[in-house]
Each structure stands twice: as structure tokens, then as C-alpha cells.
């Protein structure tokens, strides 16, 4: 279902400009909000998806709720890392300062933010998101999120967000273009307690990861390919992720394919 773009009832000039930009990026229409409620707009425009710009921020309203950018779990994770604690994703990636990471399933962006924090100014994190609405909101949010934490802000603004299908994006890259290629596909058995994901169900790309995509990721990775899934998932074995990190006390685990020292030619 198409998404339309509008503003609050009395928008400031910056919000109007952002809404115009969003409509252009999404190749959709900007609708003057006037005095209409969102329900009235849904009826008038025959859609359940409305992107609203207010006070410079962007929200997407769908039939399942509202979505807006927030760094979410990246905040406590970065705090814990700064306190010297371990992070299962970072361990699975064997991530070091200066590394380059291709996050093929950017989604809400939390994992990419943590990866960017570890990779640092000398590293590179690129996030691929297939859904144009989500890519737009996350890109705008990372660039404009208001926070007093300079490490968090720096990590967010360094991330390059690309709207694309990861299968096509991987195919266009040379061998060993990134140190680490990362996948966090929609779990085959969703964790329904994840309230932040609920408004996006039915919008996000939920196709299972394919063996062909994993093979392309192995070609593109210089060090490792990593996949996040439920700790009990059979996807790890199906796709050749034989090394598992985490999951003992967590419902989430990370499968690892180590590139170095292995013959994938």
C-alpha cells in the first residue's frame, strides 16, 4: 500500500521542507493536512500508511501503530561497552576499530549504531534497507536525533544509509569490499514482545535469507559473515553458520562464517 506524506496541523517551515523532500524521495504525493485528522486522510487518500512531519521529526503511521526513529537498545549497549562489558554481536563480528561493516538488513538501525561506535572514525558502516519509508526515517533520524551523548551522535552520523535490496547491492560489490557482512533478517519465529517492530509488520521485507545471498556475502566479506537469529533457530544450520556466539542466557544468538583461513573460491 502506498504511503502519503503530510505535516502537523500548523507546521513550521522546516517541517514543510522536510515533508516535501520525503515525498520526492518516496515518489509519492504531499497532502496538505489542513484541518483533517489522520483517519480522514486515510479515507480521502485510500491508504493506511501516512508519514507525518512535525517539529522536524518524521513518524510513519500504519494500521499496526506508529514508527519513528530512536536509537533504542544501542544506547544501553554502548553504555555497557564503555563500561568494559562484552556485546555478543561485537564478539561475533570480531569487530575492531577501523573495520568496515555492511549491515544488509538495517531495519531500526540499532545494530549498525553499535557497530559504528566500535569501528570508530577510521571505520565504515553502511546500512542497506529495502523499504523506502524505513530507510528515509532512519537516515533522517540518525542525522538529526537530539542527544547529549557525543559518542552516540558520532556513531549515528557516520552511518551511510542506502535504500536497496541487499541481494542486488551485494552483487554489485567487488570481492572483499567489506571486512564484515551482517544479516538480521526477520526471525522465522518472531519475538512478538518486540513492540518497536510491531508497527512495521506487513511493511518490512520478511523473506528468509537465501543460500545464494550468503554465498555472495562470503565473497564480499574479507573477514566474517554474521547472522542474527533466535538461539534455537534451524536457519543457522540451513545456511552454513556452524559457529554460534551467544544464546546461552539470551533468546538471540549470532551465527558466524569465518572467512580468513577458509577456502571459499
Image (cartoon, rainbow, N blue to C red):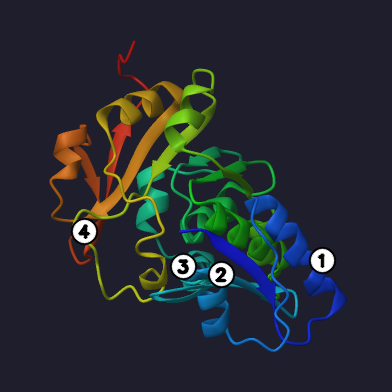
Q: Earlier in the sequence, mark 4 or mark 1?
A: 1
Q: Earlier in the sequence, mark 1 or mark 3?
A: 1
State which quarter of the image contains the C terminus. Answer: top left
Label 3 to label 4, Cα distance in Å?
16 Å
Secondary structure type for disc 4: loop
Q: Up-down: is 47 above or below 167?
A: below
Q: Nearer the viewer's eye, disc 1 or disc 3?
A: 1
Label 4 to label 1, Cα distance in Å?
45 Å
Q: Earlier in the sequence, mark 2 or mark 4?
A: 2
Q: Nearer the viewer's eye, disc 1 or disc 2?
A: 2
**Tags 4 and 1 in contact by the CB under 8 Å rule?**
no
- Residue 69, given in percent of the width and then of the height, sits at 57, 69
Viewer-nearest residue: 260 or 11:
11
**Tags 3 and 2 in contact by the CB under 8 Å rule?**
no
Please name the residue that numbered disc 2 is placed on: 45
Q: Nearer the viewer's eye, disc 2 or disc 4?
A: 2
Please name the residue that numbered disc 3 is placed on: 77
Viewer-nearest residue: 219 or 262:
219
Q: Is residue 36 left or right of residue 72?
A: right
**Tags 1 and 3 in contact by the CB under 8 Å rule?**
no
Label 3 to label 2, Cα distance in Å?
41 Å
- Residue 30, given in percent of the width and then of the height, sits at 70, 65
Q: Earlier in the sequence, mark 3 or mark 2?
A: 2
Please name the residue shown 39% across and 29% down the image: 217
Secondary structure type for disc 2: helix
Viewer-nearest residue: 57 or 3:
3
Q: Which mark is residue 17?
A: 1
Amino acid at each position: 500500500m502506498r504511503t502519503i506524506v503530510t505535516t502537523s496541523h500548523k507546521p513550521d517551515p522546516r517541517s514543510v521542507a522536510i515533508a516535501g523532500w520525503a515525498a520526492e524521495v518516496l515518489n509519492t504525493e504531499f497532502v496538505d493536512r489542513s484541518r483533517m485528522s489522520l483517519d480522514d486522510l486515510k479515507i480521502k487518500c485510500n491508504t493506511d500508511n501516512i508519514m507525518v512531519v512535525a517539529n522536524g521529526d518524521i513518524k510513519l503511521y500504519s494500521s499496526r501503530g506508529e514508527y519513528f526513529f530512536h536509537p533504542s537498545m544501542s544506547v544501553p549497549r554502548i553504555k555497557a561497552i564503555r563500561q568494559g562489558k562484552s556485546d555478543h554481536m561485537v564478539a561475533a563480528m570480531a569487530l575492531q576499530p577501523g573495520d568496515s561493516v555492511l549491515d544488509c538488513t538495517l531495519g531500526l538501525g540499532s545494530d549498525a549504531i553499535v557497530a559504528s561506535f566500535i569501528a570508530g572514525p577510521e571505520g565504515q558502516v553502511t546500512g542497506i534497507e529495502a523499504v523506502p519509508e524505513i530507510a528515509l526515517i532512519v537516515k533522517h533520524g540518525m542525522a538529526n536525533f537530539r542527544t547529549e551523548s557525543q559518542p552516540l551522535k558520532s556513531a549515528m552520523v557516520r552511518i551511510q544509509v542506502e535504500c536497496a535490496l541487499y541481494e542486488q547491492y551485494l552483487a554489485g560489490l567487488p570481492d572483499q569490499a567489506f571486512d564484515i557482512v551482517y544479516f538480521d533478517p526477520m526471525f522465522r519465529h518472531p519475538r512478538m514482545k518486540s513492540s518497536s517492530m510491531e508497527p512495521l509488520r506487513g511493511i518490512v521485507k520478511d523473506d528468509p535469507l537465501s543460500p545464494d545471498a550468503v554465498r555472495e556475502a562470503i565473497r564480499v566479506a574479507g573477514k566474517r559473515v554474521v547472522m542474527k537469529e533466535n538461539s534455537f533457530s534451524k536457519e543457522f544450520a540451513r545456511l552454513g553458520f556452524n559457529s554460534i556466539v551467544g544464546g546461552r542466557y539470551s533468546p538471540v544468538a549470532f551465527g558466524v562464517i569465518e572467512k580468513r583461513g577458509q577456502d571459499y573460491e
